[in-house]
Image (cartoon, helix red, strand yellow):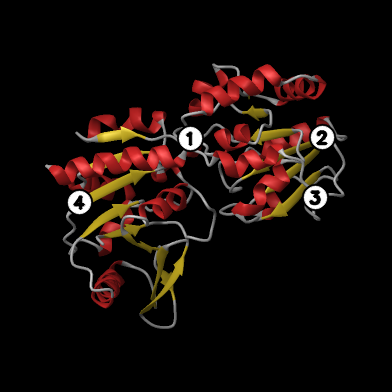
Amino acid sequence: MQHLLCFSHLSWNFVFQRPQHLLTRFAKIYQVLYFEEPKIGESHHYTVDFQDGVYIVQLFVTRHDEETNAEIAKLIKSVIKEYEIQSYISWYYTPMALDFTYELSPELVIYDSMDELSAFKFAPPRLLALEDELFQMADIVFTGGQTLYQAKKHRHHNIHAFPSSIDKDHFGAARLFQDSPKDQEHIPYPRLGFFGVVDERFDVQLLRDVAGERPNWNFIIIGPVVKISHEDLPQAPNIHYLGSKQYSELPAYISQWDISLIMFALNESTKFISPTKTPEYLAAGKPVISTPITDVVEPYGSKGLVHIVDDCTSFVLAAEEILKENNREEWLSNVDNFLKDNSWDHTFSKMNNLISELYAK
């Protein structure tokens, strides 16, 4: 079995998202080793854990700077030697990994640009320069959405847009009645919920304004808080932060929501995002309110599948309209028709076919 070495900025167990969906599928035809971003430890060493069919490699160095990149490279070579890896693909989620992978000799180089990382808070200054190098090295580039594809399509000869996909069966379970999880069952209705990473992309002010405007509506926020302070989040009796949940738990929470939310601010970090939660909410059969994120407006907003709002007033009007609706059969039929060919299995298959074509050449 051939090997696929993935170098990512994300911890495997942080949030189950694009890398996990794709690589668990690629693990059926490759032996996949997922190298997390190097961490600080008491010594230079690595650990390997086997989860979801993927080997999760954690790299530890006493400090992480340009001088320790050589030590990280040695650790990677040690892993390759231990697992007797001869031929392999290098798959990158972050250009920063080039600093310690220059000496590798992959048969193919793949760059899956799932986000515009340079626009995120605390982005390393060298990221853009390294991304230029990665574009030169890559045999094929994937992007996590149409807007990101439009921004980068002129930088590579073999680039393809693969927007967010879904596991319909997983989130479709939310359409069936489920008991509310313990930490949610006491929260009164109506319930408006969000799941995802709460960071600089999250529209803190919109949540504060709407929660204040409608104190009888309850807002449920699920997910880790990173890169922003908990003290900066709005606090009110009708705002409930339930923390991180396992991917397997999400349908049970969503099943008891009246409205699902894509509550992102419009800033540099959200300019190119394609939120995976959009089709996931829809697969769960829940009405969606979203701020005007480009990859949500088109196609979801333009097709009437998602309510697009740009301030507190339009949010309240959209939510009131949803809460008054008694019959959503036509909308749900349109949702299902739109999502019928959308799945991570299809995305994986298309990506794999493109990779196979490269091998054939």
Q: Residue 34, percent across and down?
A: 38, 62
Question: What's under tag 4, amino acid-wise?
Answer: Leu
In this rendered view, identify the residue nearer to me: 204 or 158. 158
Q: Is residue 211 left or right of residue 12?
A: right
Q: Is residue 33 left or right of residue 335?
A: left
Question: Quarter of the image holding residue 201?
Answer: top right
Label 4: which secondary element: strand
Label 2: which secondary element: helix
Q: Residue 32, percent across and down?
A: 34, 61
Q: CA distance from mark 4 to mark 1?
A: 26 Å
In this rendered view, identify the residue nearer to me: 237 or 285. 285
Q: CA distance from mark 3 to mark 2?
A: 21 Å
User: Which residue matches tag 2?
Assistant: 212
User: Which residue matches tag 1?
Assistant: 274
Question: What's under tag 2, amino acid-wise?
Answer: Gly
Q: CA distance from mark 3 to mark 1?
A: 28 Å
Question: Residue 108 got which mark?
Answer: 4
Disc 3 or 2, which lies upstream in sequence? 3
User: Which residue matches tag 3?
Assistant: 184
Disc 2 or 4, which lies upstream in sequence? 4
Q: Quadrant of the C terminus?
A: top left
Disc 3 or 1, which lies upstream in sequence? 3
Question: What's under tag 1, amino acid-wise?
Answer: Ser
Residue drawn at x 44%, y 83% is 42
